[in-house]
Amino acid sequence: MLIAGNDEVKNVTIKSRRSPDLFGFVLIGMVRGLAAWSAYAVLEFLASSVIIRLTRPYARFTTWHWALTGLLAAGYLAAGTISGILLGVMLFLLRNTRRLSGGQAGVVIGHAATFILMLAITLHVATQPAAPDIWWKLILIPVALLIFLGLSIYSQVWSERFGLLVNPWVAAALFLGGGQISALQFLGMARQLGIFIQPWYYAGIGILLLVALAAAVVGRRCREAWDLERTLSWMAISMATILITASFGLGIERDPLDPPQVPLGGDASRPNVVLIVMDAVRADHLSVGGYGRDTTPNLRKLAADATWYSQTVSAADVTLSSHASIFTSLYPSWHGAYCHPPDADFGRPIGPVPTMAELLEQSGYHTLGVAANLYLRSQFGLERGFQQFRIPRPVPVLPTESWYMLRNAMRRVIGWFTDTAQFDRLYSRGDAVNREFFAMLSKENPAQAPFFAFFNYMDAHFPYIPPAPFDGLFPGREPGIAQADLAALARQSAGGGVSAVYTRHTASQYDGGIAYMDAQIGQLLNWLKREGQYENTMIIVTADHGESFGEKGLFQHGNSVYANLLHVGLLVKYPHSEHTGVVNTPVSLVDILPTVLKAAGVKAPASLQGEDLLDPAATAPRKLFSESFPCPVTHEPECPAGCTMRAVVSWPEKYIVADNGKSELYELLQDPQETHNLLGSRSQTAQSLSTELNAWVKTMPAGQNPIHVAGVGRALPSAMLRRPPILSMPVGSGEPDEPDR
């Protein structure tokens, strides 16, 4: 940095003051460094956490959010202290230059401290994989501020001209404000829901320009008179100290919730119904179904009183479509809730069809629901029929649109000293779901009616971050790995097989997430037993879809109709445990609603496509169907923008067809992982199932976009099937304004 210059200013007399000694330079550097980084810490907290809380009514602060906020603020203060001390030493060595020897050491050090902050921000933004049309616009702000700060360090004239524009409060506010404006371009879900972004975009730019102008003008007139620099410095340090203290205080984990004692008498002639969906849980990772790791000890106990359906097929590969099928007993093309680009990239709302909650509520049930996944919110229609429904969505620490904030880099630094996996959390933990349910129940009075309670847990969902001690329950975890690292490891799979690190880590944390959900389910079961309601309650535990971990080059979900996404677990405890055992005949998630209605004594609508699981027709040979639509996730290279895919299971065969012409045939009994495409060797079977699928497609409601298969489609080479997708961004990021798939 240049610090020598011509400081001769008309009508300004600079009083000669003695230059500080080394201790003085270090002390001033530490204070100004603390002030600069403290101002940024406070404003970043407001820009990231507070604004999300104020603009998104479903968002709420959690203990883990506060604990992580405290770590970030402490990290910033440590960075300010260290950089300030080093800056003080460096400038002490240059103390004889005119700028520093003229009584302006404090001002110069303050500018230099802000310069270092802006330099760190610039380097951070420059290394982020953001879209070019956003990246270059945002980086202009810290680059311009670096120029202004450099001139202010060089010359007192420029320092006075810029006024408060080069103060850390204003510099940080301009940068973070620009980031907030750039984040508007990420809000695809908001646009789909009809929220107009453009006016806010231009209004934000106007506000930034006004702030910059006001800072320069006010600073010129009032900075010396009011001693604003010193006042603002100590205000920043004080506010950051308060933020740290409050965050660590609010971040103390509460004791496990003791479920309330609520009278639950109801009509004993009709059972209560509890439906639990473990989001993104594939059947082959459940110990209740024979998995080697004991991921579900509570479900294994429940299985003694229940029926385990070992070959359950989901109707879809994403949360919206699958939950809609569970609630309506209709396949996606019938209920209409599925991704439909370009007008509904994230999914259409459910159509005017009766749902489980509506049917039970109309027949006298008290209906309650709590979900961790935003796809269950009212805009998609899945809350219909629930008298009380809540989504306790947390304020995230690292939402996707915060890519430009220094907290992303600071998280890496903190990771050198402690575990930072929870920084990637975007949804509520299972304990928050239970807590919300019990809080809701204590305010209601369901004693005079049977109740229907729905739970959606997401603790096994990407980015696979179960809380302690479940994160260490199974071996394989890689300490320090973050969501972005998982995406990078997936990208590396383009050269061949899936990374061993990726496989070990995701399996360990995925299984830990399942075990954590199982523990929350165990709490619900204990509560039902304590309240004397267990025997007269129908308990259904299942998943909406599974998860891919690189099989066939695919990751996560929403991109295929393969078994790892469609084979889910289904455990049903019938009232009074009247039916127990294991059923190996394939069934579908569309069978849940008719089964519930029969147990509740409610007449089922004629439109339902599923079967009552206790009806012999449910376990007789029949065709089960599944669908996948082009959602905004990473797809295979043959369908870069996504394909519409459908599958029909006629046990043990499964036939798959996509709208790009690809067809596949698998024998599930011998090949449950679907690794051997038998299309060429069993063409007659494939042709027969193709005919069956075409016949089903022809019965779809008008306005759908069916895949008509004139004959058996082409089979792509196995090498192409193994090719992984090229990931352009962290998949499954789950932005706060966009639902998790």
Image (cartoon, rainbow, N blue to C red):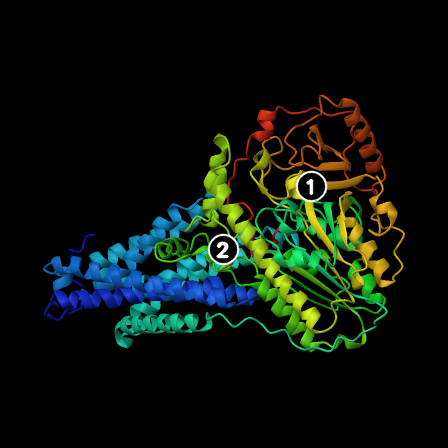
Q: Is residue 169 visible?
A: no
Q: Is residue 364 left or right of residue 108?
A: right
Q: Is residue 716 left or right of residue 396?
A: right
Q: Residue at x 75, y 70 (%)?
A: 533
Of labels 2 and 1, earlier in sequence is 2
Amino acid marked by disc 2: Asp
Q: Residue at x 71, y 49 (%)?
A: 322
Q: Which one is in front, 117 or 378?
A: 378
Q: Position of residue 572 (x, y in %)?
A: 75, 56
* Secondary element at tag 2: helix
Vertical position of residue 728 compared to residue 572: above or below: above
Q: Which residue is mark 2?
A: 471
Say the numbered circle drawn on residue 629: 1
Q: Position of residue 17 (x, y in %)?
A: 11, 70
Q: Is residue 668 left or right of residue 293?
A: right
Contact flag, marks 2 and 1 (Cβ < 8 Å): no
- What separation in Å lies between label 2 and label 1 (alpha carbons)? 33 Å
Mark 2 nearby-residue class (10 Å; few <14, some 14–19, many ≥20): many
* Secondary element at tag 1: loop
Vertical position of residue 630 compared to residue 710: above or below: below
Vertical position of residue 292 compared to residue 670: above or below: below
Q: Is residue 531 visible?
A: yes
Q: Which one is in front, 672 or 4?
A: 672
Q: Which one is in front, 630 or 232?
A: 630
Amino acid marked by disc 1: Phe
Q: Is residue 267 left or right of residue 209?
A: right
